[in-house]
Amino acid sequence: MTEQAPRERYREQVREEIKQHARQQIAEAGLPALSLTAIAKQMSMTVPALYRYYRGRDELITALIRDAFRSLADTVRAAADSGADLLALAHVIRDWAKADPQRYFLIYGTPVPGYHALPDTTAISNEVMEVLIEANAALGEPEPATTFHVHLETHREWVDSDTVGTGAVRRALSFWTRLHGVLSLELAGHFTGMKFDPALLIDDELAELKA
């Protein structure tokens, strides 16, 4: 045990350094620019040596996605536990996204061709939705008024709680799609030149949703 512990610590240090180089590549040129060969060169390693830490590009991407979702889930949960309401949670998520747009696009941008997220990664992402459903449930249960609401009644297996009404789940989905619609357009620069404040647009969208 005592002999393996230092080796394991060194291995984790190297894996973290590899991820740091990967994040820098993605921040500078986007996910398509991610290159294990370039990372190995930066770290004065051979590519086969780097593969001892990550078996390939997909495994490295998975580690980065897990880290991103873990960071977002922890941030959102901490805000909710501190009393943040639905509107405050929207701005917590926006602040997190604006702090590192490429990290945001890694998990909410265009899917990587041929890449499929592992179940444990999906489970972490679901933690974010759990918080949003809880926050929407606190607003009360709206009356079912749409075809989708009725449809959702029999298509909510992904919701962990059986006690939350489908109306709250429906509203959480609307919150999620409206927020990420604005965020994706904002971070991609599509509001540039329009001269308005995207934060106020988010406020309007969510106030309309709550009403």
Image (spheres, grey):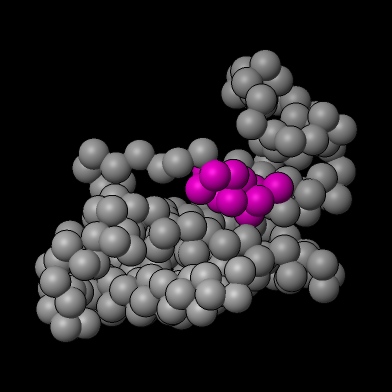
- Residue at (21% x, 82% y) in the render: 43
Asked if residue 207 is positioned above or below residue 46 in the image, the reply reads: above
Picture quadrant of residue 205: bottom right
Q: Quadrant of residue 10?
A: bottom left
Q: Tell whether position 192 is magenta.
A: no
Tell me the quarter of the picture where residue 159 sits. top right
Report how many numbered discs are placed on residues in the image: 0
Q: Main secondary structure of the magenta part?
A: helix
| Horizontal arrangement in the rendering, residue 3 relative to residue 77 (left or right) | left
The answer, for residue 45, to whether it is visible in the render is yes
Residue 57 lies left or right of residue 144; in this view the side is left
Tell which of 111 and 177 is nearer to you.
111
x, y (%) of residue 160? 74, 36
Position of residue 7 measured from the top left corner of the image (x, y, whole percent):
46, 75
Expressed as whole percent of the image width and height from the top left, the position of residue 207 reads 67, 58
Q: Tell me the quarter of the image containing the N terminus.
A: bottom right
| In-front residue for pair 81/116 | 116
Nearer to me, 8 or 149: 8
Q: Is residue 204 visible?
A: no
Q: Position of residue 208 (x, y in %)?
A: 65, 53
On screen, residue 207 versus residue 118, left or right, reads right
* Residue 77 higher or lower than 176, as above or below: below
Q: Nearer the viewer, residue 129 or 119?
A: 119
Give the side of residue 168 with respect to residue 199, left or right.
right
Residue at x 42%, y 59% (from the top left corner) = 63
Q: Residue at x 24, y 67 (%)?
A: 50
What's drawn in magenta, residue-wise? 120-130
